[in-house]
Amino acid sequence: MADILQVSLRGTRREFFLNSRSLWLKLRDPVIVQNEHGESLGTVLLKDPTLVELKRPGSVTHEILRKATEEDLAQEDTNRAREKDAYAYCRERIELRELNMELADVEMTFGGNRITFYFSAERRVDFRELVKDLASRLHTRIELRQIGVRDQSRRLDGCGPCGRAFCCSTWLKDFHPVTLKMGREQQLSLNPGKISGACGRLMCCLAYELSQYRDSAAKMPPVGAKLPTGQGVCVVTRTELYREAVWVRDDEGGEHRIAYADLPPGPYHKCGDCNCGKRSKPRASGGPGPADDAAPEGRADAPPG
């Protein structure tokens, strides 16, 4: 069975390839790999079988062709220079034709037979004339690919408010839905400037610790619950999920902070005695209970008035 190696490709992409030719490779060795559009230049990033297995690469079909030579490295430098010229020319034509699109990145295949222009736009763009301009200038196959704002940030890379590189450009494989409800459950400020990433969307890290916050909220007494304390019965006014503490108000109006470890044991309320919205169960005797409301209008089994 051929060895599987992880190779760092253009930008921040990391993919797995088969070393079916049993090449003698070390970490950070430049290699030429096979991809869907031909060949690409990359760098060996991971080769330890145990670590590769932890990454769970799944089905690997592409392979490493050879170790890069000096000619290959020179060709890559030439391609990067052509990409810069293509990027500048494409920006110029976009402005001239007044197209509502933002050019994100330009990538040329190692063989130079294809140039892909990545752009983002709010709606569909008619770029047929732009493709003609680029083909007549660059004399190669042109491909324009529209990407989302998150994919654009992944390709451009950068640092987040935490001071580290973007998760999407380093290790995050797929984008998962992130909602404002996640921020509310974590008691975060809903200021868009504080919870939005460089892409303008909600930060992906809002979902990382959501399950922990939900576990804390499940075991903490809700707002309005009455707790017996040494100073009498106090009412919970607010909770601190991150620090696992609650603020309570006593009969005299004073507020106190109590850690979860110092709270009396739960459960802190029963459904029907609070405003959680749940209905109480019917009484065991069969008589009308809080849940036995009048039959809704239009029901066939409703008793006549």
Image: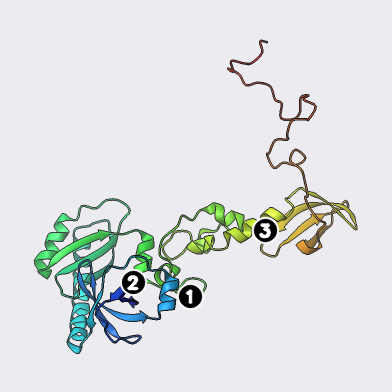
299 above or below 48?
above
Q: Given this view, does label 1 or label 2 mark the residue nearer the observer?
A: 2
Between the C-alphas of marks 2 and 3, the distance is 38 Å
Q: In which quadrant of the rendered image does the C terminus lie?
A: top right
68 and 204: which one is in front?
68
Q: Residue at x 31, y 81 (%)?
A: 43
Amino acid type shown at disc 2: Glu
Residue under label 3, please give it.
216
The mark that comes first in sequence, 1 or 2, is: 2
Disc assigned to residue 9 = none
Give the color scheme: rainbow, by chain, secondary structure or one colour.
rainbow
Q: Residues within 10 Å of mark 3 (few under 14, many from 20)?
A: some
Amino acid type shown at disc 1: Arg
Amino acid type shown at disc 3: Ser
Query: Looking at the picture, how far across and down is residue 85, in whole percent?
Result: 19, 74
Query: Looking at the picture, how far across and down is residue 298, in whole percent?
Result: 58, 17
185 above or below 286?
below
Q: Is residue 10 visible?
A: no
Q: Is residue 36 left or right of residue 205?
A: left
Residue under label 2, please give it.
15
Decide: marks 1, 2 in contact (CB < 8 A)?
A: no
Q: Residues within 10 Å of mark 1 (few under 14, many from 20)?
A: few
Query: Circle 2 — which element?
Result: strand
194 and 46: which one is in front?
46
The mark that comes first in sequence, 1 or 3, is: 1
300 and 54: which one is in front?
54
115 and 281: which one is in front?
281
